[in-house]
Amino acid sequence: MLAIDEKELRNPVYLNNIGMKVLEENLGKAATVMFLQQYEKGVGDYTAERHEWLDGETMESFKAEIASNEGQ
């Protein structure tokens, strides 16, 4: 069992270290990484980028692209 210093819980570095130890002890290293990746912020503006990719596209253009890739 991990000893926790109640006085230090307000210290964000201490709290982060304790949290990482608890996760690793209970989930293992690989699952801890997978768990933490769920909460990664990411970068960019997905909504603006999506408009760049999709503006001007139609259902027909999607169907045509799918049809052209079916034999590959």
Image (cartoon, rainbow, N blue to C red):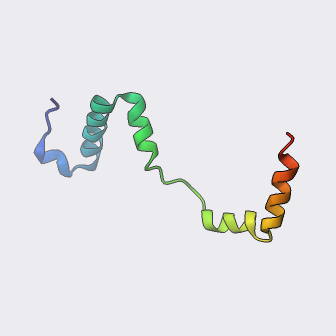
Closer to us: 6 or 34 = 34
Which corner quadrant of the image does residue 43 belong to? bottom right
x 81%, y 59%: residue: 63
Quadrant assignment for the N terminus? top left
Measuring 44% from the left and 38% from the top, which residue is drawn there?
34
Q: Report whether 14 appears left or right of 59.
A: left
**What percent of the width, then of the height, locates residue 41?**
48, 54
Farthest residue to the bottom: give it.
Answer: 56
Q: Position of residue 25 (x, y in %)?
A: 27, 29
Give how far across and how far down residue 51 sits, in percent: 70, 69
Outermost residue to the left: 6
Q: Determine which quarter of the picture holds residue 32.
A: top left
Q: How many marks?
A: 0
**Residue 72 locus on image (x, y percent):** 85, 39
Whether residue 18 is visible, yes or no, is yes
| Corner quadrant of residue 20 | top left
The answer to whether 43 appears left or right of 51 in the picture is: left
On the question of residue 45 being in view, the answer is no
The residue depicted at 30 percent of the width and 44 percent of the height is 16
Q: Nearer the viewer, residue 30 or 65?
A: 65
19 left or right of 47? left
At 81% from the left and 52% from the top, the residue drawn is 66
Tell which of 7 and 43 is nearer to you. 43
Q: Is residue 55 left or right of residue 72?
A: left
Q: Nearer the viewer, residue 40 or 58?
A: 58
Q: Is residue 43 above or below residue 70?
A: below
